Amino acid sequence: MAQTLNRGPVSGTAVKPPSKKKPFFVDFYSTAVGKKYVMAITGIIGIGFVIGHMIGNLKMYLGVVTEGDGRAYDIDIYGEFLRQILVPILPHGVFLWIMRFVLIGALVLHLHAAYSLTVLNRKARPVKYQTPRDYQVANFASRTMRWTGIIVVLFLAWHLADLTWGWANPDFVKGAVYRNLDTSLSRLPVAILYIVANIALGIHLFHGTWSLFQSLGWSSPRFNQWRRYLATGVATLVVVGNCSFPIAVQAGIIDYNPDAVTATQEAAP
Amino acid sequence: MSTLTNLTLKIWRQDGPTGQGRFESHQIPEISDEASFLELLDILNERLIEEGKEAIVFDHDCREGICGTCSLMIDGQAHGPSKGAATCQIHMRTFNSGDEIVVEPWRAAAFPVIKDLMVDRAPLDRIIEAGGYITAPTGGAPDANLIPIPKPVADASMDAAACIGCGACVAACPNGAASLFTSAKLAHLNLLPQGQAERYKRAEAMVEKMDEYFGSCTNHGECQAACPKEISIDNIAIMNIDYLKSKFKNRKLLDR
């Protein structure tokens, strides 16, 4: 044999010498299984946000409602409500920032874990198969997780610039959610971008939602067959809900009308 | 019984661990459909030896699917096209006359090619050494049913214990992960009463040893599809939860 095998010391018991004490999270995160736990938990946070965000946006379809002595778009009132959560326990907008920090933290961890696991996996097979693989069960979603993830992150940057900061929106008014959405999505290329990005997100969630059960060790014959249905449901819900907005704007169902609201609504505290 | 004709074998040849590999094509004019795939290679090797050429090196031993020695990537599938079968259990009847069959060694950083189609799977032994056993004085043979084990538990453990350690899971995994192997070995012992004493030491040690050599699981499920013993990826979920528990429990115990 051309190679001498290097055998490690064979110990009589499974005792591992106590290593240097690292903080629990750092120690756990240093392993691939630990990183997968982080991927799954931050993924759940992301799925929760995406579904909540989509349901909140459905208020677009409620149009104008009577608010106090004036009339305002329901989604604008909802946008202001998000800043008012837990007031007066916390000052105005603070709870929203707490939620934002949780999301930013989850995103950073999700990206870092994904990056380091990708590096690990590339190293685990430096010489690729020279002929095409005949995959049996790995589906399109599972094999494109990295690409759909990158598309979603790039879209997220655009989405914030478009509807949160307003840099990519030619006629942006802070707080006028309905109006901003209409002006942005009236541009056909932007509407197509939103649809493409949300389909990528749906593909990502189709594998992610199923996969997180494995990563977290949530496996039981009682519900294992439901994991696939749940993943399909989550992906469908998000894609159908989110893609409906650009389509509704393009179809004229969502159409900003400045005369429908009273001017006081933007002066809300 | 019929005969397959005019097969082309495209086989990976590599002189040694550091050698540059290449594909080599061999014509098989005629072969019985009852021949196993390894017999096809035997026949080809006899011909090569008669011609004064070097025989193709490949791993094989029991040839009945229980030893886990054979290891070939046939037409892009670990252990070839049959479900729940090792390479030695693949028969020529699964192919058609005129086919081109591509044979590659298993590829992973942990499985360096020794020669041609033979790879070194020693890292799987390293994982076993880290905790894939129980430390118990065995003594004389115990009476039957001395330790009561519920039938479903024994079945689940036995299903995991069916792992023959061939490494097809690593070969089939797009990430080169050994999660199915490690999780099967863990589930085999961790489900049984005899495995409880060292359960969490074992989970921590084996998972961390696995990390040194292999990639990470992204839940494609290719390993389960390639496994000649059809071991379920449910075992990977058991491994993950046991690893998390081990990190808590072992830290707590070490702090006492």
Image: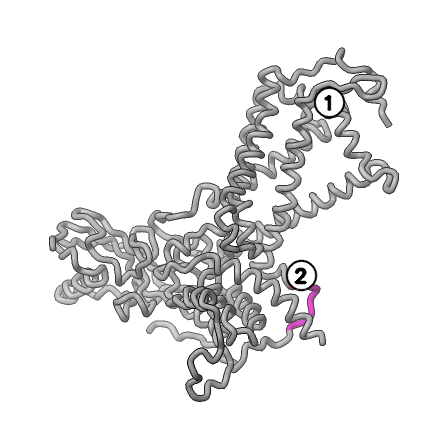
In magenta, the rendered stretch is A19-27
Tags 1 and 2 in contact by the CB under 8 Å rule? no
Secondary structure beneath dot 2 equals: helix
The verdict on residue B63 being magenta is no
Q: Amino acid at mark 2?
A: Val
Local crowd size for mark 2, using a 10 Å CA cut-off: few (<14), some (14–19), many (≥20): few
Q: Quick check: A216 above or below B212?
A: above
- Residue matched to label 2: A26
Secondary structure beneath dot 1 equals: loop
The quarter holding residue B198 reads: bottom right
- Seen as rendered, the residue at the extreme top is A259
Residue A190 in view, yes or no? no
The quarter holding residue A28 reads: bottom right
Residue B70 falls left or right of residue B127: left
Q: Chain of mark 2?
A: A
The quarter holding residue B14 reads: bottom left
Cα distance between the residues tagged 1 and 2: 43 Å
Which residue is pictured at 55% across the width and 25% down the height? A192
Residue A115 falls left or right of residue B82: right
Which residue is pictured at 39% across the width and 66% down the height? B163
The verdict on residue A22 being magenta is yes
Q: Amino acid at mark 1?
A: Phe
- Residue matched to label 1: A172
- Name the image colouring: one colour
Q: Quick check: A264 above or below A32?
A: above
Q: How many marks?
A: 2
